[in-house]
Image (spheres, rainbow, N blue to C red):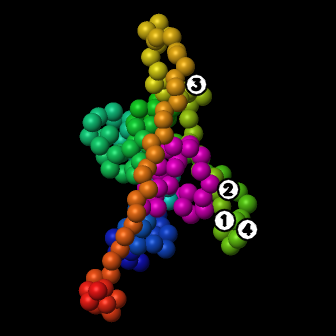
Amino acid sequence: MHFHGTKLNHKKLSRTAGARRALLRGLLDSLILYERIETTETKAKALAPYFEAQVTRAKKQTLAAYRQILAETINPVAAQKLYYDLVNGFSSRQGGYTRIIKTAPRLGDGAKMAVIELVLDEGYKPKEQPKQEADSTTAKPTQAKKPAKKATKAKEAVTTKITTGKKAKKEAKK
C-alpha cells in the first residue's frame, strides 16, 4: 500500500498540511501552558509524539534546540516554559512524557474525547516567577498615590461635504 509521503502512524486529521500544522502547534502550546487539556482522542494521539519530540529537543539545552522549539510553538512563553521549567520535570524519564486518559464521548456529535496530560517527576515543583517589585530591603515605603487625572477629549465636530453628485452641484451654484 502506498502512502505517498505520509508515515504509517501519521494522521491527517481531515485537514490540509498547513491547517494540520497550525492545529498541532496550538495544541502543543496549550499542553505546555496548562499541562493538561481535553481534546478528541485522535488529536491527542497525534499530539503526543509531536510533544515528545519537543521535550527531547529541550533536554539538549542548546541555543539551536531552543530556537527550534521557538519555531514550533506559536506562543514564545510556551517555548520558555518548556525549555527552562518543564524540562526539569522530565529529567528522570527517557520518554513517555504524556498520558492520554479516555473520557466520555462529546455530547454534541459523539466524538471520542480524551484528556492528555504531562507526566512529571515526583519531586518536580515549577519555578516561581520572579516578582516585579524590588526586595523589601531596598524598597521605599509605599505612599498613597493620587489617582491619575483622566484625559478629557475635546469633542470634535465632524463635517463632511459631498464632493460629487447632485448635492455638490447645487452647493457649488450657491
* Residue of label 4: 107
- Which residue in the protein does label 1 denote? 112
**Distance in Å between CA atoms under marks 4 and 3:** 38 Å
CA separation, marks 1 and 3? 33 Å
Which quarter of the rendered picture does the N terminus lie within? bottom left
- Are the two marked residues, 4 and 3, in contact with CB atoms closer than 8 angstroms? no
What secondary structure is marked by label 2?
strand
The residue beneath circle 2 is 102
| Main secondary structure type of the part rendered in magenta | helix
- Nearest to N terminus: mark 2 or mark 1: 2
Q: Tell me whether circle 2 and circle 1 mark residues in contact (CB < 8 Å).
A: yes
Q: Looking at the image, can residue 164 be seen?
A: no
Q: Which callout, 4 or 1, points at the residue further toward the start of the chain?
A: 4
Look at label 1 and name its amino acid: Lys
| Magenta segment | 22-45
Q: Secondary structure at mark 4?
A: loop
